[in-house]
Image: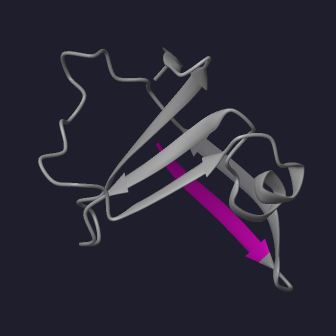
Amino acid sequence: MATVAQWRGGQIIREILFMRELPAEEAPRPAAHPTLTLTNPDNEGLRRTVGVYPGWTRAIHGSALGSRTVTFTKWEKGLIAEQ
């Protein structure tokens, strides 16, 4: 995913999102443990603050600019429902 935004007066006035969901065989496989993991069991404030929706986990792998991988996982009853 990539975002291009046009700013004016400290506010975004136009935003364009480019995204394509990768099939499982194309998705990168992180080799190390996540650099950062955010999980939101059911907290609307956390969703507003960091963008992790209730029931989802966001795991960020890597720290170098341009080489980070983010995995979004939705959990239901302790099982992965969507990734």
- In the image, 67 versus 61, the foreground residue is 61
| Residue found 49% across the figure and 36% down from its top | 72
Asked whether, in this view, residue 31 is left or right of residue 20, the answer is left
Residue 62 drawn at (x, y percent): 25, 63
Residue 4 highlighted magenta (yes or no): yes
Asked whether, in this view, residue 56 is left or right of residue 79, the answer is right
Asked whether, in this view, residue 30 is left or right of residue 2, the answer is left
Is 5 drawn above or below residue 7 in the view shown? above
Tell me which segment is drawn in magenta: 1-7
| Residue found 32% across the figure and 65% down from its top | 35
- In the image, 55 versus 5, the foreground residue is 55
Magenta part, dominant SS: strand
| Residue found 20% across the figure and 22% down from its top | 26
Residue 33 highlighted magenta (yes or no): no
- In the image, 23 versus 59, the foreground residue is 59
Residue 28 drawn at (x, y percent): 20, 36
Q: Residue furthest left?
A: 31
Is 11 drawn above or below residue 44 in the view shown? below
Is 23 drawn above or below residue 73 in the view shown? above
Could you tell me how many numbered marks the image carries? 0
